Amino acid sequence: MTTLPGNKQAGFSLLEILVAFSILAIALGILLNIFSSGVETAAVAEEYTSAVQIAETLMARTGVESALQPGQTAGIENDKYSWQVSIAPYELTLEDFDARSLPAALFMVTVNVSWGDGASNGNHQREVELTTLKLSAKSS
């Protein structure tokens, strides 16, 4: 605060007010940027969570709703997530072991879920892939 000689009134100068408003504007801009980045990160995390849930559901259904057969199936979930399930025979390669003598067959199941985030700076494709081995009774 400045005081003028012979004047009993005191106050802020125009320059001091402009500097204070500039600092306030810069601080608010930084805070808004931090909050918007946090919201964007939360949205991406929600998309990944949904994709993993879809992949886990497809993985759990594989071999339960229908017999395990080599091949691929694909589809779209919630008009956003495209998925593909691949089933392939898996051969054990252990010495002194004949996998043909086992009463069960081993299959590798791979579930891939992908989606685009629809960003304005280009369409970024994201994906989640889960892989597991499942046993199935051999067909005679």
Image (cartoon, rainbow, N blue to C red):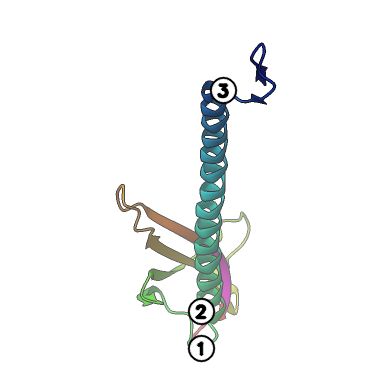
Q: Which amino acid does label 2 sit on?
A: Thr
Kindly identify the residue that appears in the image at 38 percent across and 70 percent down. 80
Q: Tell me whether the residue at label 2 lies in contact with that at label 1, contact meaning CB atoms closer than 8 angstroms.
A: yes
User: Which is more toward the observer, 76 or 24?
Assistant: 24
Quadrant of the image occupied by residue 125: bottom left
- Residue receiving disc 1: 65
Q: Which amino acid does label 1 sit on?
A: Glu
How busy is the neighbourhood of tag 1: few (under 14 within 10 Å), some, or many (20 plus)?
A: few
- Element at label 1: loop
Mark 2 or mark 3, whichever is nearer to me: 3
Tag of residue 13: 3
Whether residue 91 is visible to the viewer of this picture, yes or no, is no
Where is residue 20 shown, x and y percent of the image? 58, 29
* First in sequence: mark 2 vs mark 3: 3
In whole angstroms, how far apart are the C-alphas of marks 2 and 1? Answer: 7 Å
- Give left or right: position of 62 versus 122: right
Quadrant of the image occupied by residue 71: bottom left
Whether residue 39 is visible to the viewer of this picture, yes or no, is yes
- Residue receiving disc 2: 62
Q: Tell me whether the residue at label 3 lies in contact with that at label 1, contact meaning CB atoms closer than 8 angstroms.
A: no
Q: Which amino acid does label 3 sit on?
A: Ser
Q: Quadrant of the N terminus?
A: top right
Tell me where the magenta segment starts and ends, as one range.
Answer: 131-135
Asked if residue 133 is positioned above or below residue 20 in the image, the reply reads below
